[in-house]
Image (tube, rainbow, N blue to C red):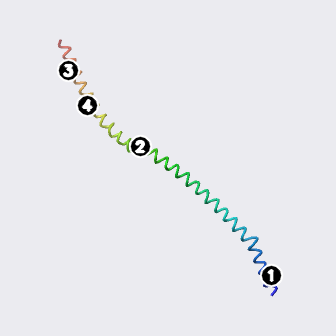
Amino acid sequence: MTAVYWIWSATLTIITFVVVPLAVHLLHRTLKATRAIERYARESLTAGVGIATNTSAIPALEQTLATAGSLAEASKLLRARAEEIGGVAVDVAASR
């Protein structure tokens, strides 16, 4: 029976001085990694909110571009009319 007690005490010693410290070390590394992931996720959330805020004006810019296109066409028509009026004015001035 002394061999049984010797094996039992050797097993308890190995568990106490090897397995438990190793488990504590691995759990500590896991906790550090978890905290780092949480910190990175928090930073990503802040960056994502900033991006969403900065890109919220894109629909307004698209509307501005659509309006600018119609303004460009209107200015071309006005220029053509102004050239016609200028031509008539030159003809009237030349006839006097």
* Mark in the foreground, 4 or 2: 2
- How far across and down, in percent of the image, does residue 54 sit? 46, 44
The residue at the point 49 percent across, 47 percent down is 50
Callout 1 amino acid: Trp
Q: Which residue is identified by label 2? A: 57
Mark 2 or mark 3: name the one nearer the start of the chain. 2
Considering only vertical position in the picture, is 61 above or below 89? below
Q: Which residue is identified by label 1? A: 6
Label 3 near label 4: C-beta < 8 Å? no
Q: Quadrant of the N terminus?
A: bottom right
SS type, badge 3:
helix
Q: Which residue is identified by label 4? A: 77
SS type, badge 4:
helix
Left of 94 or right of it: where is 76? right
- How far across and down, in percent of the image, does residue 4 sit? 78, 85
Which numbered disc covers residue 95?
A: none
The residue at the point 48 percent across, 47 percent down is 51
Which numbered disc covers residue 88?
A: 3
Callout 2 amino acid: Ala
Q: Quadrant of the C terminus?
A: top left
Mark 4 or mark 2: name the one nearer the start of the chain. 2
The residue at the point 52 percent across, 52 percent down is 45
Neighbour tally class for label 3: few under 14, some 14-19, many 20 plus, Cα within 10 Å = few
Callout 4 amino acid: Leu
Left of 95 or right of it: where is 20? right
